[in-house]
Amino acid sequence: MPVLLPTMSGMRIRPARLNAATASLFVLGSACFVVGSVPAYADAVGETADGVTYFAGSIFFTAASFLQLVQAQTPSAEPLVFWRRLPHDRGWLAAITQFAGTLAFNVSTLAALAHNASVREQDRHVWRPDAVGSTLFLVASVFAILAIGSFWSWRPRSLPWHIAWLNMLGSIFFMVSALASFVLPGTGELLDDRIAVAGTLLGALCFLIASALMFPAFEPTPDAVRRKANDHGISRQR
């Protein structure tokens, strides 16, 4: 659990701790979607428990996205900023768009828990928010890639580059899953159940790997490095 450092002007948190908390929540959310997409798990626990797994995963995603938004809004030398508009910052645009997408997934996964919903209700309350969330994830992934360079950049030794492209790949899989999850009015069946499940599973796996890479990818700011060196020097003097 991150350590909050109070100051005269507000609340502070060590950037490394904030990054670790964000990454951990993304890992948990991705893991829930991975597990929920495994047919054997769904068969073992039942439809309701499987739906709850997805909903829990969406909540983890939302919490992680909110922390990432706070990260984008808070320079390391300042107290936490819970809301600040930075429309010219591509990192902030990626974070705010992703956060909105997770809210849409909250709606779709919660609505999916309802039983005996009509085809119209499923399309309105489950499929539409799912499609909106997947679209927003795609847009957020574009902003994230542009925040570290361009679409034509080739940086295989850069962890942030791998994270951005894994998130893009995951978002594409989620969009494929959303399209395949459209409920056909005539039959009440999904357009393609296998593609829907496979898209969610593969997308969640991409997000899971990207989330795990956030731990080693974190680079402390120069100020943080100097503070750590000063603290170490004081400890040695003692």
Image: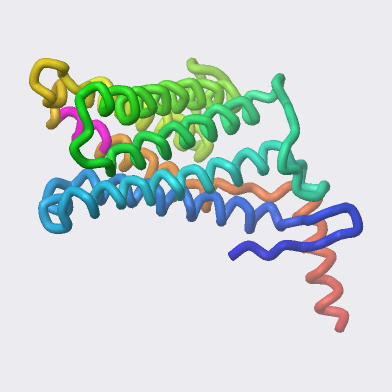
Q: Residue furthest bottom?
A: 238
Left or right: 188 as drawn, with respect to 52 = left
Relative height, residue 203 to residue 237 (above, below): above
Relative image position of residue 163 (x, y in whole percent): 47, 37
Q: Residue at x 33, y 23 (%)?
A: 124
First to last magenta residue range:
195-200
Instruction: Examine the structure image and report whether residue 50 is included in the region drawn in magenta.
Output: no
Residue nearer the viewer, 116 or 211: 116
Relative image position of residue 143 (x, y in whole percent): 55, 22
Quadrant housing residue 173: top left
Q: In which quarter of the image is the C terminus?
A: bottom right
Q: Which residue is drawn at 56% across and 55% down?
A: 20
Dominant secondary-structure state across the stretch colored magenta: helix
Residue nearer the viewer, 36 or 14: 36
Inspect this view and state whether residue 53 appears. Answer: yes
Left or right: 214 as drawn, with respect to 218 = left
Give the colour scheme shown.
rainbow
Q: Which residue is drawn at 22% across and 26% down?
A: 181
Relative height, residue 189 to residue 61 (above, below): above
Q: Quadrant of the N terminus?
A: bottom right
Instruction: Examine the structure image and report whether residue 197 is included in the region drawn in magenta.
Output: yes
Left or right: 221 as drawn, with respect to 137 = right
Inspect this view and state whether residue 222 appears. Answer: no
Q: Residue furthest right?
A: 8
Relative height, residue 160 to residue 6 (above, below): above
Left or right: 123 as drawn, with respect to 83 = left
Q: Residue at x 59, y 42 (%)?
A: 66
Relative image position of residue 123 (x, y in whole percent): 28, 23
